[in-house]
Amino acid sequence: MTTVDETIQDVAPESNQELKSIAQQDYKYGFITEVESDTVPPGLTEDTVRLISSKKNEPEWMLEWRLKAFRHWESLLDKEQLPDWAHIKHPPINFQDIIYYSAPKQKEQLSSLDEVDPEVLSTFEKLGIPLEEQKMLAGVAVDAVFDSVSVATTFKAKLAELGIIFSSFSEAIQDHPDLVRKYLGSVVPYTDNFYAALNAAVFSDGSFCYIPKGVRCPMELTTYFRINTENSGQFERTLIVADESSFVSYLEGCSAPIRDTNQLHAAVVELVAMDDAEIKYSTIQNWYPGDENGKGGIYNFVTKRGKCLGARSKISWTQVETGSAITWKYPSVLLQGDDSIGEFFSVALVKGRQQADTGSKMTHIGKRTKSTIIAKGVSAGQAENTYRGLVRVNPGADDAWNFTQCDSLLIGDQCGAHTTPYVEVKNKSAYLEHEAFTSRVSEDQLFYCNSRGISVEKAHSMIINGFCEEVFKKLPFEFAVEATRLLELNLEGTVG
Amino acid sequence: MTTTSPLDTYLTDFAGAARDYQAARAGRDPDWIADIRAEALDSFQELGLPTTRRGNEEWKYTDIRPLVRQGFTAPTIAGPGATPALDLDSLNVGSASWHRVVIVDGRYTPELSALDSLPDGVVTGSLAEAVHSESDAVRAHLTRLADHKEQGFTALNTALAADGALILLPRMAAVEEPIQVVYVSTEQTQGTASMPRTLIIAGEDSSASIVETHVSMSDDAHLTNAVTEIVVGAGASISYCKVQQESEATYNVSTTQVEVNENANFRSMAIDIGGRLTRNNLTVIMAGEGSNSDVRGAYVISRDQHVDNQVIVDHLVGHNDMNELYKGILDGHARSVFHGSIIVRPNAAKVNAMQVDKNLLLSNDAEADTKPAFWIYCDDVRCGHGAACGNLDDDSMFYLLSRGIGEEEARMMLIRAFVSEIVDAIREPSIHDHVAALIADKLDNL
């Protein structure tokens, strides 16, 4: 009699083949756009910071803040206090080789999309990002960031009718200096960590969003980031403030051309939610991951944090991480307001020689605060995937509640899946539960699918999609479909 | 003027003591052990003690600077003196029917030990004597598992351990009554450090239940820096229970290194009720296929007690099962740390591993820090972990109260039930009863 195991072994060679092919899936956003750009020479000194600030025609306070951040960053660099605790490996980064500012050349002032370089517009078109307002695709407002600057923001006028401010960060500094000054660095101070300090010193643009009291933003807001210039780093900053009883759903996407050098992306995202406000922040991260030998790719070192400042406020992070040579990010929530809620839903898929060290941090400060973490990791090829998370309950956080689940799937015997959750409890009324499970795709499930005539690859795709479904469900509808497709694309050929 | 840091004082004082000890033993102990001691001394001087705070992941939640500031002095390594008058029964260390090796202030004390009824071939007694008599097994295994080149505390123990206990089970030996090693610190150890060393070698297909107890006779502060090495031979079945019942002024750092060979069965139990600061480093190396380990711990702590359990289970090969469960009850200003690491090496397929830590906080000043981690480099595994932290369940309390049970009694019932999941896993009845009584006693005194 043939046992299940033997049957599985029969299909194994085929599945190995398919595993291989998934691991070698091509990156389809890797084209380069030929566009004339205004680029400063590589290197970072106080003068670079001043130059960036003056190019943006920034007020004095902004320059001062950048300089303080720069000095702090320099002191960390001198003391060699770079974050070294993550489970990632890369050669030391020479911060003097990086171009800190690059912008597509354009007219002084853009009054409409027609004035944006058509090359840049066609880049976003190729990426499937709707910049032309008349297309009105799915009612999504987009802020497009190309290298260091925001090139176009759509639907501004319509949003302004509701009092919503959605603009590039540079414009916000000019048009709404009081708001920016009040909240900039209030969630992620420049002293937070090495890369946050670097970002504060040199960030060139990003998105700013303010939702006034009682307003429910009628459409998804989106920022699309594109790194184009070779050897450039991208340092953008996003700040979203949701005033009392408001709601906003925000999505960011990213891609970069295929280059065989590593490029640094060190972004900062700050979210502030007032009483009864809710921010839903979704990311589909698809930076260039490097080739199958680990050459090239983006170092994605990002600091993302939300502050539930008001009572009953809610911040929800959803991320689908499929790109980047290295991902180092821990979207977090400071649960300061009583009864506030923090959520983190993540799918991290790594293949080839990608490395991901990602997770979340929930800090319970207010009473009856709740947090949920659902993290799904999929490793294939020779990739390393680490979940790293912290749930902290401070002494005053009576009746705090947390549920954490971090599961990993391994595809192939060359990859790694690691889990390092930290739980710190200083209040006896807290209730915390943590669960994690790691395995490969179950042989029984595969056998079942095979016996129903479903190929090994198709079966893997189904099972992995099922594994990630809980997270995909949290994405805005249009993007849930995109995320599923992205995952399938990425898995094609790796599975067995 | 140069100021000497407390750590420097340690380095000088302990290194001096180690040199004196080596000089005293020159020509009396075999060369191999002298070489190891010299090497360990060098390592200790190089490694020091893990006092650094920044980036010190292994000691993230346990600051040993207070231990260093206490300024414990090196143990006085005297020859055998008069047996101190002490009554083991009054120390509540377990059943008088157990086979017993008693080590008082770092010296094997035959008068208090009870080893007459051991089965033939089982060697139990002074480790120093075994070293001196050139036991091959001791030479093959002593310091093999506990790496003195990596850990300062282990290096210190290796350089200074004057005596300890040896348990050597030959092939097929089956010891029915538990074998206990008791380390007693008398008043004389006040302000000093002791370096207990235990070596357990279980031959193929042997079986035994072993209890290692640390107890102090006074409430004075001292430091216990223990190292235990356990080799579980192929097919052997060993249960090992470590009981920390020292005074609440004691600092205890215990390093236990275990190697589990093929088809072997290893069960460990860490019971922590005493001590001011207790740090247990337990490493279980799953070195053979078809093996099984069950690693448990219970800590019941109050006032300013601090217990830190670092548990590493390293699967070098596959086809084995591991279950790990730690539970803690914290009152007063107590603080617990659990840091578990399950490592599955490449090609260690078919590993089933489960790791759980649960804490019950009875006071708002208590703190529980937990980090159950995985490092998995092989796809064909089933590994899970969990952690939970909370107060007594309201519904359960309500149920008991509605049945006419008083609040205090209901509370104690739930607390006892919480910890019994650990204690009831002890299979040997006399060890179970002893540990259950110790915990019940501690719970009454919270």
Image (cartoon, coloured by chain):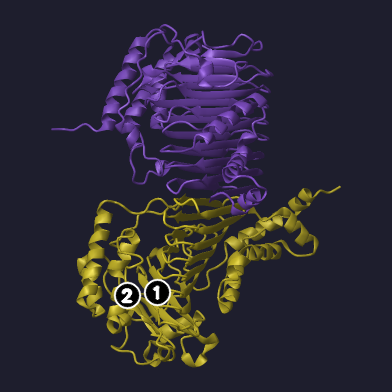
Chain colours: A yellow, B purple
Q: Dot 2 surroundings within 10 Å: few (below 14), some, or many (20 or more)?
A: many
- Give the label on residue B219, or none: none
A115, B126: nearer the viewer: B126
**x, y percent for residue B404:** 65, 47
Amino acid type for the residue under numbered disc 1: Asn
Q: Which residue is mark 2?
A: A102
Badges 1 and 2: C-beta atoms under 8 Å apart?
yes
Whether residue B137 is visible here, answered yes or no, is: no
B17, A41: nearer the viewer: B17
Whether residue A452 is visible here, answered yes or no, is: yes
> Would residue A103 be found to the left or right of residue B267 on screen?
left
**x, y percent for residue A268:** 37, 68
Amino acid type for the residue under numbered disc 2: Ser
Mark 1: which secondary structure?
Answer: loop
Q: Image quadrant for the N terminus of chain B?
A: top left
Chain of residue at mark 1: A
| First in residue order: circle 1 vs circle 2 | 2
Mark 2: which secondary structure?
Answer: strand
Residue in view at x 28 percent, y 79 percent: A178
